[in-house]
Amino acid sequence: MLYPVVKRVNEILALGYVTARIVECTFIAIGILSLLTVVTLRQGVAAGEDAASLITVGKSLVALHEWTRLLGPGFVVGVGNGLMLGYLMYSSRLMPRGMAMLGLIGGPLIIASGVGVLLGIIEAGSVWQGIATIPEFFWELSIGIWLTIRGFNPSAAIFSEPDTTDLY
C-alpha cells in the first residue's frame, strides 16, 4: 500500500522495498512449510515408519526453518523495512524524521546482528540480537500507529503539484 506514495520520492527504492518485503514473506512461508512438514513426519513415526530416517529429515527441516528465520526477518527486514523505507520516509518528510531515524538505525543493527549470527560471532536469539532489534521493533510499531492515527504529513513536498512553468 505504500508503493504508490513512496514511488514519488524514489521509484527504484520503492520497488526495492516491495521486493524486500516479498523476499521476506517468501522466507517466512518456506519456514512455516518446513515446520508443517515436521508435523507430517511425526505422524509417520507414530504410524511405525522408519523412525531414524524420519528424525534425521525432521532435524533438517527444523534447521531450514532456523535459516529462513535468520535470513528473512533477521536480515532482509533490515534492508527493506529499515534502510529503504526509513530513507524514503526520512527524505520525503511523510512522517516525522525522528521516527524515520529509528528505521535508519534499526536496519543496520538487524543486518549486523544477522551477519553476526551467520558468522558465529553471536548466538541466534541471544540478548545481543534482541537488543539489536529494539529500534526496528519501535520503527515498525510507530509506522502502523502513526499512519493509523495521523496519516502522512499533508504538507510533504510529494503532495504538492509539480511546477510546470519551467518546462518550456
Image: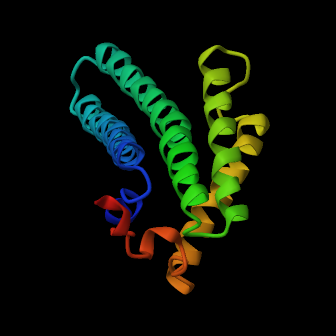
Q: What residue is at 71 percent from the left and 36 percent from the top? A: 129
Where is residue 128, by image quadrant? top right
Vertical position of residue 128 compared to residue 162: above or below: above
Image coords of residue 15 (percent x, y):
33, 46
For residue 118, which quarter of the picture?
top right
Total numbered labels: 0
Q: Residue sitting at 38 percent across and 20 percent down?
A: 60
Q: Which color mode does the image show?
A: rainbow
Q: Nearer the viewer, residue 135 or 28?
A: 135
Outermost residue on the bottom side: it is: 149
For the residue pair 86 and 67, the one nearer the viewer reads as: 86
Q: In this view, does 126 lie to the left or right of 141?
A: right
Percent across and percent down for residue 134 are 72, 51
- Rendered-image quadrant of the N terminus: bottom left
Judge whether 36 appears above or below 157 on screen. Answer: above
Residue 83 percent across, percent down from the top left: 57, 43
The residue sitting at 62% across, 68% down in the picture is 142
x then y, percent, for residue 65: 42, 32
**Residue 125 position by quadrant:** top right
Residue drawn 71% across the image and 45% down it: 105
**Is 125 situated left or right of 70 in this image?**
right
Quadrant assignment for the C terminus? bottom left
Q: Which of 85 and 145 is in front in this view?
A: 85
Q: Residue furthest front?
A: 168
